Image: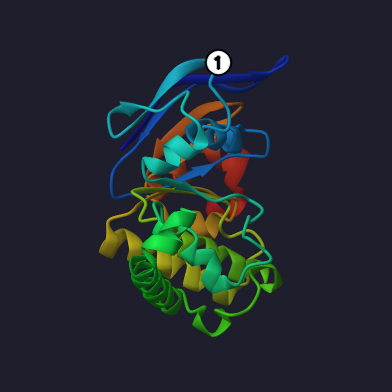
Amino acid sequence: MLEIQRVEKSFGGLKAVNDCSFTVKKGTITGLIGPNGAGKTTLFNIITGHYKPDRGKIFFQGEAIDGLAPHQIFKKKVYRTFQITREFAQMTVLENLMIMPEHQLGERIWNTWFRSPSVRHQEKELRDKALEVLEFVELIDLKDEYAGSLSGGQKKLLEIARSMMADPTLVLLDEPGAGVNPTLMRKLIANIETLREEKGMTFFLIEHDMDLVMNLCEPVVVMSEGTKLCEGTAAEVQQDECVLEAYLGGQYR
């Protein structure tokens, strides 16, 4: 689904991504791990159009997307979250979901004058879908709360809910477990697994929580100094001596 070919990106004298190549297969939950400064988030920024690569190519479903703007990549059905959630804080939880789908009739002011029945009908459909999604992620009781008032874990669940409203093919999650308590973490993991199994979504996620990675992700890609160090199943990565020493610590020996 996603192919990264010899991608490089430098900032001044710092090479953040260095000759990095690997693939993300359809229907997988692929984990990306590595220490701070390994180039993981920079690579996400390149994939989603926030940075242009200095060298290399990125293909999504066989189509080159390097060089496209973020909104163009979003239209390709690639959705991305950030380490720090970016909800619309002064909108309600429900409104945060309803704003996500493209091509809403109400976005054009003349439709509200001349096609108001169609606008109302579409608005009702979007509201019904949003309520179903909020039921799924167990945020329905907070639908009328301002999104900015949610806890960190609830905002991560809101990000998953917003992705569902966009009907993505590929979801990139940047540290979805950061700041999430164990109860909400279990909900988050269950939601991701269910969306992969029932909706056919593919997930590619950066994460420092090794328990989450080892229990959720397969395959796992390890980055170091801007390039791929190794790739394999969770079990294979646990047994790799370089990974054990550099990233996972002695508890995985």
Q: Quadrant of residue 52?
A: top right
Which quadrant of the figure contains the N terminus? top left
Establish if 171 lies above or below 115. Answer: above
In percent of width and height, residue 57 lies at 41, 20
Q: How is the image coloured?
A: rainbow
Q: Name the outermost residue toward the front.
A: 114
Q: Quadrant of residue 184?
A: bottom right
In percent of width and height, residue 146 lies at 66, 73
Residue at 60%, 72% (x, y): give it: 92
Residue at 48%, 33% (x, y): give it: 47
Is residue 214 something that shows in the picture?
A: no
Q: Is residue 22 left or right of residue 81?
A: left
Q: Is residue 34 left or right of residue 130?
A: right
Is residue 127 something that shows in the picture?
A: yes
Residue at 45%, 25% (x, y): give it: 66
Closer to the camera in the image, 129 or 138: 129
Residue under label 1, please give it.
54
Residue at 30%, 41% (x, y): give it: 25
Establish if 109 lies above or below 121. Answer: above
Q: How many marks?
A: 1
Q: Name the outermost residue toward the right.
A: 12
Establish if 177 lies above or below 76. Answer: below
Closer to the camera in the image, 99 or 223: 99
- Tag 1: residue type? Asp
In percent of width and height, residue 223 lies at 54, 33
Secondary structure state at the residue bearing disc 1: loop
In percent of width and height, residue 252 lies at 53, 53
Within 10 Å of disc 1 (Cα), the crowding (few <14, some 14-19, many 20+) is: some
